[in-house]
Image: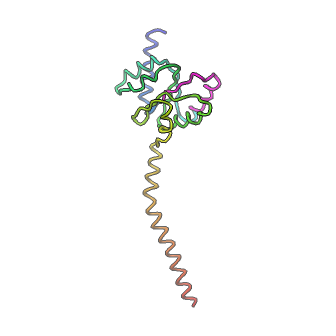
Amino acid sequence: MRKEDKNTIIGQLAATVQEYNHFYLVDTTAMNAVKTSALRRECYQTDIKLVVVKNSLLLKALESLENDYSPIYGSLKGTTAVMFSNVANAPAKLIKSKAKEGVPSLKAAYAEESFYIGVDQLDALVSIKSKNEVIADVIALLQSPAKNVISALQSGGNTLHGVLKTLGER
């Protein structure tokens, strides 16, 4: 590969890393063409961009960026594919759903401005809540007291109405 081509690929990888908030490094060594194609299809359906990269080019792309990605440099060995996503836990859920097959396996991840190294971090990554999930939880917490007050007023009104009706009938 010519140096100009390598520089172009490094620039594209760096731009992709900056475009997405989260990325996962996965090992796809044990995957054949059929499994890889199926994984690409599932990634596309869940808004995850899957890119198979050469480790040295990804390393140079990460080094060219402002952020320090050095904790994941040790994971750049063997066959590596990168899953880019704007939702922190989406790739983790996809990888976990494929856990029965054992492929792909997690090497490392950069999610929510933190580094997760090793397959044992998969459960922690799955439990990360997305921005929309956190907003939904906050709204539910804010609505809970109001719902309790309304429920108490409605049940109290029905009880009071029942008592008055019974007294009126006597």
Going by the image, does 102 lie left or right of 132? right
Residue located at (40% from left, 23% from top)? 62
The residue at the far right in this view is 34
Looking at this view, is 162 or 56 the one in front?
A: 56
Residue located at (55% from left, 88% from top)? 168
Q: Magenta segment, which residues?
A: 24-43
Q: Is residue 136 above or below residue 39?
A: below
The image position of residue 128, as x and y in percent, is 46, 41
The image position of residue 53, as x and y in percent, is 50, 20
The image position of residue 43, as x and y in percent, is 56, 32
Q: Is residue 13 above or below residue 91?
A: above
Looking at this view, is 126 or 169 the one in front?
A: 126
State the image quarter where residue 100 is shown. Answer: top right
The residue at the far bottom in this view is 170
Q: Is residue 30 magenta?
A: yes
The image position of residue 56, as x and y in percent, is 45, 16
Q: What is the number of callouts on the image?
A: 0
Residue located at (41% from left, 20% from top)? 61
The residue at the far front in this view is 120
The C terminus: image quadrant: bottom right
The residue at the far top in this view is 2
Q: Is residue 148 magenta?
A: no
Residue located at (52% from left, 84% from top)? 164
State the image quarter where residue 69 is shown. Answer: top left
Color style of the picture: rainbow
